[in-house]
Amino acid sequence: AVAAYDRNNIFARILRGEIPCKKVYEDEHALAFHDIHPQAKIHVLVIPKGAYVSMADFSAQASDKEIAGFVRAVGKTAEILGVVESGYRLLANHGPNSHQEVPHLHVHIFGGQALGKMLA
Ligand code: 5GP
């Protein structure tokens, strides 16, 4: 079963412009912005504009266009951040075991420094 989407979660409010963010990239499918508590020199979040809690419901319910748009936005954001050559890490938490805090799908981009093997 897929968790119901809470339209007042913090990223939904950022998408509606109710809460400010430090924007990196935006298009019709996605928004990328700096994490408020960076865990690496570069720490950016990319979110789809649709109401999806996690990769599970996004992959099951989003249109091919939304999925392609989101994946392209992640790649574009990495390019804008200038981390493609030096390297970066993508991470998406889903559910209680992963300590997902915000119930709107987001992919973390970590970079700008050598990263450990895993980020907790
Ligand atoms: P999660 O643990 O759900 O994968 O990651 C949520 C991330 O969102 C955390 O890294 C946290 O610092 C970030 N975050 C939480 N609230 C805000 C906010 O209001 N603005 C921004 N830019 N990031 C936030």
Image (cartoon, grey):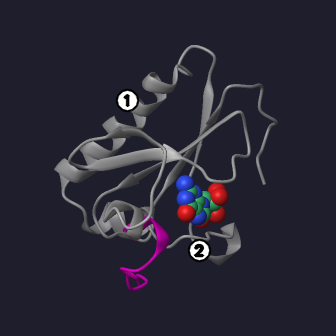
**Circle 1 residues within 10 Å: few <14, some 14–19, many ≥20:** some
Instruction: Report the residue at 59% width, 74% height from top.
Output: 95
Query: Considering the image in quadrants, where does the C terminus appear?
Result: bottom right
Instruction: From the image, tell me which residue sits under label 1.
Output: 76
- Depth check, front residue: 86 or 25: 25
Q: Which badge, 1 or 2, is on the more N-terminal residue?
A: 1
Residue 9 in the image, given as x and y percentages of width and height: 46, 76
Viewer-proximal residue among 18 and 109: 18
Count of numbered circles in the view: 2
> Residue 46: image x %, image y %?
45, 48
Visible in this render: residue 34?
Answer: yes
Magenta segment main secondary structure: loop
Residue drawn at x 61%, y 69% is 100
Assess whether mark 2 and mark 1 are in contact (beta carbons under 8 angstroms).
no
Q: Is residue 62 above or below residue 35?
A: below
Q: Is residue 15 above or below residue 89?
A: below
Q: Quick check: 108 left or right of 55?
A: right
Confirm whether the magenta stretch covers residue 7: yes
Which corner quadrant of the image does residue 20 belong to? bottom left
Location of residue 61 in the rendering, given as x and y in whole percent from the top left corner: 26, 68
Per the image, label 1 sits on a secondary structure element best described as helix
Q: Is residue 94 magenta?
A: no
Please tell me whether residue 85 is drawn above or below residue 41 in the rendered image.
above
Q: Which residues are magenta?
A: 1-12
Query: Which residue corresponds to mark 2?
Result: 95
Q: Amino acid at mark 2?
A: Gly
Q: What's the CA distance linking mark 1 and mark 2?
A: 27 Å
Q: Residue 76 is drawn in which quadrant?
A: top left
Which element type, helix, strand or loop, lies under badge 2?
A: loop
